[in-house]
Image (spheres, rainbow, N blue to C red):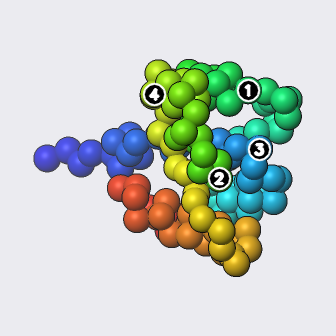
């Protein structure tokens, strides 16, 4: 019986896109932790409307991470998000965590949410 290749059957590594409100440190720490990350500032001007970047990352198949909890209340952004079809994580709440603590949570999530883990 022929053995199947684990690498051939594994899903592609996701690319995470971090919104401008997460700054530059958070995406750098995610990248240092082994994730594929594209920060806002590498692709868009600071004044780029949410509707524009949501559409673009959906076209690229990226996973959005934002701290903009009010995005759900703005109909244009909500519509763009739904049409883009981009998986999106919204980090909500005020908290005393540092960017490093947030990254630890993301790396833990990424490890248990993928079939191949990050060993």
**Mark 2–mark 1 contact, CB under 8 Å?**
no
Q: Are marks 1 and 3 in contact (CB under 8 Å)?
A: no
Residue indicated by mark 1: 49
Is residue 83 rendered to the left or right of residue 102? left
Q: CA distance from mark 2 to mark 1?
A: 15 Å
**Of the pair 7 and 59, the residue shown nearer to us:** 59
Q: Residue at x 56, y 70 (%)?
A: 105
Which residue has dot 2 on it?
67
How crowded pointer 4 is (Cα within 10 Å; few <14, some 14-19, many 20+) is rated as: some
Q: Residues within 10 Å of mark 2 (few under 14, many from 20)?
A: some
Q: Earlier in the sequence, mark 4 or mark 2?
A: 2
| Number of residue marks | 4
How far apart marks 2 and 3 lie (CA) works out to 9 Å
Q: Report crowding for label 3: few under 14, some 14 to 19, many 20 or more residues within 10 A (C-alpha).
A: many
C-alpha separation, residue under disc 4 versus residue under disc 3: 20 Å
Residue 111 coordinates in the image, percent (x, y)? 47, 64
Q: Earlier in the sequence, mark 4 or mark 3?
A: 3
Looking at the rendered structure, the secondary structure element under dot 4 is: helix
Distance in Å between CA atoms under marks 1 and 3: 11 Å
Mark number displayed over residue 20: 3
Residue receiving disc 4: 82
Residue 74 visible, this angle: yes
> Residue 73 placed where, x, y %?
54, 39
Q: Are marks 2 and 3 in contact (CB under 8 Å)?
A: no
Q: Could you say whether the residue bearing mark 2 is in a helix, strand or loop?
A: loop
Q: Is residue 40 left or right of residue 30?
A: right
Q: Is residue 70 above or below residue 108?
A: above
Image position, residue 57 (x, y; %): 61, 29
Residue found at the very far left of the displayed protein: 1
């Amino acid at each position: 019986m022929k053995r199947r290749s684990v690498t051939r059957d594994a899903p592609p590594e996701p690319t995470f896109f971090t919104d401008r409100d997460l700054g530059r440190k958070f995406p750098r720490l995610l990248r240092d932790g082994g994730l594929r990350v594209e920060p806002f500032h590498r692709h868009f001007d600071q004044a780029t409307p949410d509707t524009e970047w949501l559409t673009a990352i959906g076209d690229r198949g990226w996973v959005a991470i934002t701290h903009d909890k009010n995005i759900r209340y703005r109909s244009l952004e909500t519509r763009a998000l739904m049409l883009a079809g981009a998986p999106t994580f919204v980090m909500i709440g005020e908290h005393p965590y540092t960017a490093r603590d947030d990254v630890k949570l993301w790396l833990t999530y990424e490890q248990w949410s993928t079939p191949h883990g990050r060993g």
